[in-house]
Amino acid sequence: MSKKALLIIPPDRFNEDELFKPKEALEKAGIEVTIASTKTGEVIGDFEGKANSEKVFSNTPATDFDVISVIGGSGTIDHLWDNDELSTYLKKAHNDKILVTGICAGSVSVVKAGLLKDREATCYPVDVQKNQLKENNVKYVEKHVIAHSDVITGDGPDGAEEFGKALVDAIN
């Protein structure tokens, strides 16, 4: 049976590198990728790049996937950080032994779901994100990727390729 990944983007202003680089790594490894958001249809990125949200994540069973990743971008802060549906979805996926991951602002969504309390994580190295980690009892580490067996976080566009590789390695 082939492996599957669900990449969750905000309904607008996702980061193109953080979506497309991990997506490419996953697809090159033969992993089927589905893009989801809070809506379906075309989504415009921070730099006018376009992606198609095929599904609404909350209507999509997490157990259909081997990995779930929350992608960053300025829209993630506005639409996903305090999204109770997303937090509940990530907690349930984690409880169902699905690998939960996030990159950049998406890492903060994972942290806010309570999945990294008293552990290490990374995010984009700006105070607004690092402070969210601290407020949720997570130790910020300045690295491109922090990989635990059940949760992986990435720092942002510069680490997007390494993040994609970590996802592939973790589920293969």
Image: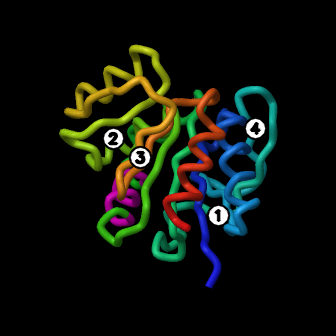
Q: Earlier in the sequence, mark 4 or mark 1?
A: 4
The residue shown at (75%, 52%) is 24
**Label 2 with label 4: CB-CB less than 8 Å:** no
Question: What residue does disc 4 label?
Answer: 44
Q: Residues within 10 Å of mark 4 (few under 14, many from 20)?
A: some
Marks 3/2: CA–CA distance: 14 Å
Q: Earlier in the sequence, mark 2 or mark 4?
A: 4
Q: Secondary structure at mark 1?
A: strand
The residue shown at (59%, 63%) is 5
Q: Give the number of the mark in front: 2 or 4.
A: 2
Question: What residue does disc 3 label?
Answer: 147
Q: Amino acid at mark 4?
A: Ile
Return the x and y of residue 156 as percentages of the image width and height: 57, 30
User: Position of 89 compared to 67: left or right?
Assistant: left
Q: Earlier in the sequence, mark 3 or mark 4?
A: 4
Marks 1/2: CA–CA distance: 23 Å
Return the x and y of residue 47 as percentages of the image width and height: 77, 26
Marks 4/1: CA–CA distance: 16 Å
Which label belongs to residue 111? 2
Q: Does residue 96 belong to the magenta stretch?
A: no
Q: The C terminus lies in which quarter of the figure? A: bottom right
